[in-house]
Amino acid sequence: MNNEWFECKVRFEKTMENGLLKKVTETYLVDALTFTEAERRFIEEMTPYISGEFTVTDIKRARLAEVIESIDASADRWFKAKVAFITLDEKTGAEKRTAQLILVQATDFRDAVENLEKGMKGTLGEWVIVSLTETPIMDIFHYKQAEEKPEFEQ
């Protein structure tokens, strides 16, 4: 089973700190097999947290090689790291770079670099950080296997 990450956006009215209602759009990441499953699971996850109506405005495939989560409870921001793996072409001797995107949870930019380095420890081969940017992602929802119901009641 090869799950993928889907970036899902939801639009709803949020009560701000000053008590006023404001229409906001928030981005989340959902681990699912298909677009349909991603939307279904996203709606299930969001329903308890949003009072009133909401609309799923966008779902797109997030081309992530890996997600590195932090054990720090205050790490509430998500950073997208573009990492280049460096290999040498044996025939030409030229350096080849293969880029991959990795999502990193952290408290700030420095913490994101540290968490990325920790997550990449033990990686065979050389790699470099090409870019690191903060994303609008609020949270991620991991894949949960549905409980199997017995085929026949006993």
Image (spheres, grey):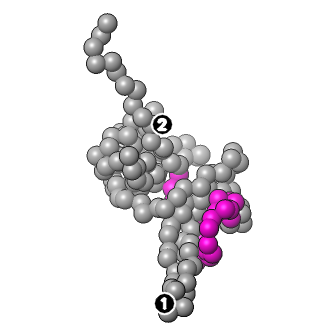
* Sequence-earlier tag: 1 or 2: 2
**Which residue: 52% across, 81% down?**
97
55 in magenta:
no
- Which span is picked out in magenta? 115-138
> Which disc number belongs to residue 107?
none
* Residue 142 place in picture, x, y as percent: 48, 43
In the displayed structure, 135 sits above or below 146; it is: below
**Residue with the most extreme front position:** 91
Viewed as shown, does residue 114 lie left or right of 47? right
- Residue topped by disc 1: 91
* Residue 52 place in picture, x, y as percent: 39, 36
Residue 44 visible? The answer is yes
**Which residue: 28% across, 46% down?**
36
Secondary structure category for the residue under label 1: loop
In the displayed structure, 3 sits above or below 132; it is: above
Q: Residues within 10 Å of mark 2 (few under 14, many from 20)?
A: few
119 in magenta:
yes
Mark 1 and mark 2 residues within 8 Å of each other at the beta carbon: no
**Which residue: 38% across, 40% down?**
41
- The amino acid type of the residue labelled 2 equals Tyr
- Residue topped by disc 2: 49
Secondary structure category for the residue under label 2: helix
Image quarter (top left, top right, bottom left or bottom right) of the C terminus: top left
Q: Nearer the viewer, mark 1 or mark 2?
A: 1
- The amino acid type of the residue labelled 1 equals Lys
